[in-house]
Amino acid sequence: MSTELTRNFSIIAHIDHGKTTLSDRLLEVTQTITDRQRQEQHLDSMDLERERGITIKSHPVTMAFPSKDGKIYRMNLLDTPGHVDFSYEVSRSLAACEGALLLVDAAQGVEAQTVANVQLAHNQNLTIIPVINKIDLPSADVASAKRQLEDILMIPAEEALLTSGKAGIGILELLEAVVERVPPPKQWDDNVLRASVFDSVFDPYRGVISYVRVMSGQIKKGQKVRMMATNKTYEVKEVGVFVPGMLKTDILNDGDVGYLIANVKTTSEVKIGDTVTDAQMSASEPLPGFKEIQPMVFAGIYPVTTDDFESLKLAMGKLQINDAALSYQAESSVALGFGFRCGFLGLLHMEIVLERLRREFDMDVISTHPGVIYEVDLTNGEHLVIDNPTQMPEPQAIEEIREPMVKVSVLIPNTNIGDVMQLIMEKRGMVDNTETLDDRRVLLSAKLPLNEILIDFNDRLKSMTKGYGSMDYAHAGYQPANLVKMDMMIAGEPVDAFSTIVHREKAEAYGRRLAERLREVIPRQLFVVAIQAMIGGKIIASERISAMRKNVTAKCYGGDISRKRKLLEKQKEGKKKMKAIGRVNIPQEAFIRVLKTSD
């Protein structure tokens, strides 16, 4: 098909603004799927995606649309993940398009992530078609949504299309608008193969399947191609398009979106954003925008039963095959045994990995407190990058510690501005700018440490704004901070599973909270157990578990008091000896309860 009749577009939206439902209607209207194939969230293939109502892996699909001008257009829709953790994948999917449908919920209006996604689309010079969705809801306020498009996003309100993915309103008009407004793929002067890889999955029988957008040239079976980031050469075994299942074709031409199967054995060989070119007639330089995906959040994952380590190792390897953003390496903990130190794109990515380990591989696992990457300069001039508290050097050897910062955009009702600013300050953040969007909502721009927003920031924001607040963040480099490593000592023994890096001002409160929680979950012993939070040898918080006491005088019926005293003295000596040599075995349940509820 001619590139003049090809349209490549994406749908961008805040979470829960109806992106996947609208995709379902587009597939039905273009008869890409039959009535027999019809199901809700058709492009979301994982159970986890269906349950949570979020898109985790992007799913491209090719549709044929007979327009009112009498021509049949090939419409390539690139569905994208919606969460900020996967913003790089979103940017690579957008780079494979010429246009984007910007979805705005008519009831909720423009949200923080809507603003961020528009910025991503502008960076890629895409044609943006504003779409106000869910207009059939009783709470829909179309006039307000149009005002917000103009005031916040600087998009003319008259360009907006009114649709309802659920009721199927305005779907044909939407497809006609894509035909009219989105330009066809750009023509290159030469015919050299350049294809952008925007995702990849692993098939156990066929190897790695790369999702590609052909920018120029063509790919066909038997052709020798080269990945420009790794400089490795492969032979193409199969090419095809998604309808939405994989359909084998003879060739992929410039402007096409489809899949490529070569003799690639692991997804680590295929980098998202990489350029595929011909092995003989290679492009002089790769397509712009490629960067390595860097994990931002680290945590330890351990099997609850130490015998399951080999099974967990196998499961992690299989999971990484389908999730190239996951990184892991073996580590051991005195308290938890053998496990893995894993790197994630963010907290949602970490939750998804843990849930997939439990569901798909039936693994019973526990994760340690999530942390971020710190940069440490030592007094001897050495520079360290630390993702695990146990790697932190002694305080006297440290010149400076820097922590990762994020720029956060928070969209909230104006009645909650005081509470949210208090929350930002509590999290060691600083509000840079406050912008009144309309008579009901305010946009706050702030800079915070990434470590502070990992756990409960979004949850607390949602609860204090009754669900109307939303946030989006982008990384903003590193900044020096007064950070310390805090260790937990139980009966004089350090427990590395509870070690963490905290800000000095918050260390005492956090140490006291953790010590109290440990006192509740550690079973009583026959001797007094001290639980201590320590920074560099100095105790900053302490709790004690009182000893269980056996009534050794129960057998004494009357007689001289010295007999009872003798028994009590003997018991006292025994406890003293036990305290000197006794060890506290912390049950696995205690780790699970503390690590699952720590904040």
Image (cartoon, rainbow, N blue to C red):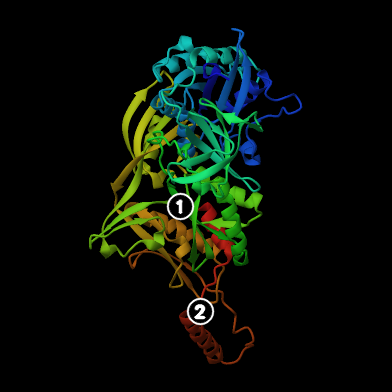
Q: Where is residue 524 drawn, in percent x and y? A: 55, 70
Q: Residues within 10 Å of mark 2 (few under 14, many from 20)?
A: some
Q: Is residue 106 visible?
A: no
Q: Label 1 crowding class (10 Å Cα cut-off): few <14, some 14-19, many 20+?
A: many
2 and 1 marks in contact (CB < 8 Å): no
- Label 2 residue SS: loop
- Taking 347 as reference, is 598 above or below it? below
In the displayed structure, would residue 449 be above or below residue 543? above
Q: Is residue 456 left or right of residue 449?
A: right
Looking at the rendered structure, the secondary structure element under dot 1 is strand
Residue marked by disc 2 = 582
Q: Residue at x 69, y 20 (%)?
A: 31
Q: Which mark is residue 525?
A: none
Q: Is residue 319 above or below residue 138?
A: below
Residue picked out by circle 1: 298
Q: Residue furthest front?
A: 280
**Where's residue 359, x and y in %?**
65, 49
- The first of marks 2 and 1 along the sequence is 1
- Separation (CA) of disc 2 from disc 1: 34 Å
Residue projecting furthest to the right: 36
